[in-house]
Amino acid sequence: MAFSPQNRSNTLNGILFVALFATSATYIAEFDFFKHLAISPLIIGIVLGILYANTLRHKLPQEWQAGILFSTKNILRLGIIFYGFRLTFQNISEVGLTGMLVSISIVSLTFIIGYVVGTKLLKLDRDTTILISAGSSICGAAAVLATEPVLKAESYKTSIAVATVVVFGTIAMFLYPFLYNSGLLDISPQMMGIYLGGTVHEVAHVVGAGNAMGEEVANSAVIVKMLRVMLLAPFLLIISLWLKQQISHTKTKQQQTKPNQTKLNQIKSSAITIPWFAVIFIVMVGVNSLNVIPSSVVITINHLDTFALTMAMTALGMETRLEKFKGIGLKPIYLATILFAWLVIGGYWLTHLLSNF
């Protein structure tokens, strides 16, 4: 056990080691260059982690490994839970039915398109497909991080998905203001905000792009983006139940053809559980909606939560070695590109279509 009396100090050393890297990422994110690009400490953290994993990782005491794994799982779940303090249920009423419909439509359609294209057309593995699709459809790196423990995916697949979020989210952050300010888009400021918040990957990217187009656009964009984030919990519950059903179906099928594999399937089936951290996430949104906690405390919670998520991203980076990427090819990039094109073009069409509601 990670925190047994004989392992406790080594595990704590591993956690503190990750925290040191996360502190560095937080400091670096304050540089004007990264602030201008709206690059969050989460992204910098995973880059630092990957650089370390492929250079000096062999010098890390093996006993500290438990602390890194603790950061990728337990601290990650804690970060997702307290992410709920960034949202309130009142956000829904502020953008009306159009904002709600755009959020739900984009999340649902983007994930379905991503899964079908990834697994059926590109023949990409299931976990990488789901992680990339989740990052594109919901809330970028945070969605990838939240989905990873449900899938029990390998760390390098998470890193691939996060990389696509960074690349295409950054492109969108510059593309949307250009399209809007050039007059190429026939759209009002409020609708532009809904379009932006409904289709861009990261919250930071939405804030950066929104501020470049004016306050009215920025306000609508952030609220719609928060609605997408709020859909993270039901998304995780649906994914968990779907995986359980899929494994149960596979188990029944294999029992008919390979009875000797029954035990293995039972083990796999029992490993899929409801992600209760997603349920607690919704509870935290409810608590925040009541306005019973002072705003200063909520701000502090948000800062600590960002640091926890940065630790989780850094630890995931530390578990990502470049040799694991051999044989992956360009398929993840193809999938992310197709989803980005859908978000830009399909999202614009959906926003216009649903603007009459």
Image (spheres, grey):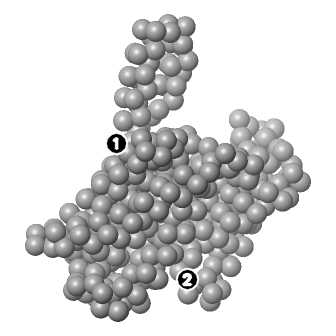
Q: Count the labels in the image.
A: 2
Outermost residue on the left side: it is 356
Q: Tell us which disc is closer to us: 2 or 1.
A: 2
Closer to us: 174 or 83: 174
Q: Residues within 10 Å of mark 2 (few under 14, many from 20)?
A: some
Q: Secondary structure at mark 1?
A: helix
Q: Is residue 107 among the parts visible in the rendering?
A: yes
Residue holding disc 2: 37
Which amino acid, by three-letter code, is at mark 2? Answer: Leu
State the residue at coordinates (68%, 57%): 317
Q: Position of residue 353 (x, y in %)?
A: 16, 69
Q: Quadrant of residue 35?
A: bottom right
Query: Tag on residue 152?
Result: none
At a point 42% along the width and 41% down the height, the residue shown is 120
- Give residue 84's quadrant in the image: bottom left
- Callout 2: SS: loop
Rendered-image quadrant of the C terminus = bottom left
Query: Cβ–Cβ below 8 Å for labels 2 and 1?
Result: no
Q: Is residue 142 left or right of residue 44?
A: left
Residue at numbered disc 1:
238
Q: Looking at the image, is 10 positioned above or below residue 348?
A: above
- Across and down, in percent, residue 178 comes to 40, 87
Task: Tell me the quadrant of the picture where the N terminus can be found.
Answer: top right
Distance from the alpha carbon under mark 2 to that under mark 1: 34 Å
Classed neighbour count for the residue bearing mark 1: other residues with Cα under 10 Å, few (<14), some (14–19), many (≥20): some
The type of residue carrying mark 1 is Ile
Question: Could you tell whether 160 is left or right of 216 in the image?
Answer: right
* Residue 88, horizontal then vertical, whole percent: 31, 67
The residue under the point 61% across, 82% down is: 34
Position of residue 232 relative to residue 209, above or below, is: above
